[in-house]
Image (tube, helix red, strand yellow):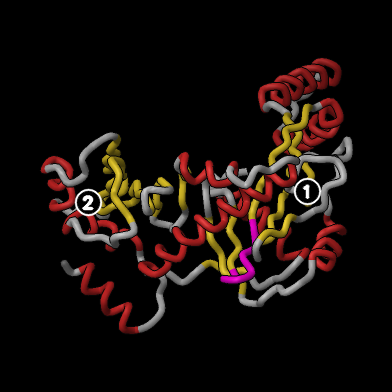
Amino acid sequence: MWFKQVQLFQLTDALKLSAEQLIEKLEPLAFTSCLPSMPHSMGWVSPVDEDGAPLIRMVNGCVMLCLQIEEKILPASVVRQELMDKVKQIEAAEGRKVYQKQKLSLKDEIIMTLLPRAFSKFTRLYAYIDTRNQWLVVGSANEKKTEQFISLFKKSLTENVYPFELNKLSPVTTYWLKQQNYPSSFSIEKACMLQDPEQSNRVVRCQQQDLFAHAIQAFIKDGYEVKQLALCWQDLVKFTLLDNFSLQAVRFEDQVIAQAGEMEPETRQQQFDADFLIMSETLTGVLKDLLQVFLKTSKEEEARVAAVESI
């Protein structure tokens, strides 16, 4: 359950609902398995993988949700082969050519025939509502999966979910590397991705490199911008910050994870709650410090960022 990826959204209403009210709103869209003829299904399940567990977990002002997605696995090569065989049968039996329009119709029929025999792939996507900060913290950086989560979230709970209005990240993170000047709560790790803004296919990926070394700094002097930057927050969490403000490769250090064990949980639900508490408290610190840098709050802030870009 420890998030390895993070996307942050703001909630413009307080969503001050009891656990019972939240569950009541989620239940109409609880997960049900795919019908034989359907290619996919999705719905809410309990965040705790345990029979009879409720659809949410509430800990210290945070509410964990879990979306389960079922997708039928139907390899394109299988559909293609079935279509070729069907076309050959028709052409041999009727002595005519099968054209594209009929092929598309035959393909749809074949898919409908094969779906009941297809294997299912199940994916779980976790996210939590931070009621204190009015955030929705999604444990994914996959655009498609995040869109699916937000879509169902809006249908179940509230339409008022929006991305934050942020200043551009690249000028700021590029400034950090160029001037070796960045917030004290962060340290810069040994990985980044640089891109030439004039030619997007000119990309430099750095791994296990001193980013302040002359060879890397030469690219920045040539105008390359930081698109991804590996950071560490207070020696507790390592992650890669992307220029769309998503966090990837999130890794909580051992001393953070150990705090959950110190609570001596005895059941699976208690273990989940302990992990959830420590993770959410830690991510709150990370996200607040990032928002303090990148959140677009005022004309004065925009002027400050413009000054950074000009350096």
Closer to us: 307 or 261 = 261
* Residue 284 picture location, percent across and down: 51, 61
Question: Could you tell whether 198 is left or right of 34 in the image?
Answer: left
* Residue 306 picture location, percent across and down: 25, 74
Task: Identify the residue at the far top of this view.
Answer: 92
Secondary element type, mark 2: loop
Q: Is residue 235 magenta-colored?
A: no
* Residue 266 picture location, percent across and down: 73, 40
Camera sees residue 249? no
Picture quarter containing residue 268?
Answer: top right
| Res. 46 mark | 1
Residue visible at 16% across and 66% down in the picture: 311
Q: Which residue is mark 2?
A: 224
Picture quarter containing residue 89?
Answer: top right
Residue visible at 40% across and 52% down in the picture: 242
Vertical position of residue 196 compared to residue 151: above or below: above
Closer to us: 247 or 243 = 247
Camera sees residue 141? yes
* Residue 186 picture location, percent across and down: 33, 55
Pointers 2 and 1 in contact (C-beta within 8 Å): no
Closer to us: 159 or 264 = 264
Indicate the amino acid at tag 2: Tyr
Vertical position of residue 11 compared to residue 269: above or below: below
Indicate the amino acid at tag 1: Ser
Question: Could you tell whether 32 is left or right of 60 in the image?
Answer: right
Q: Which residues are magenta?
A: 128-134
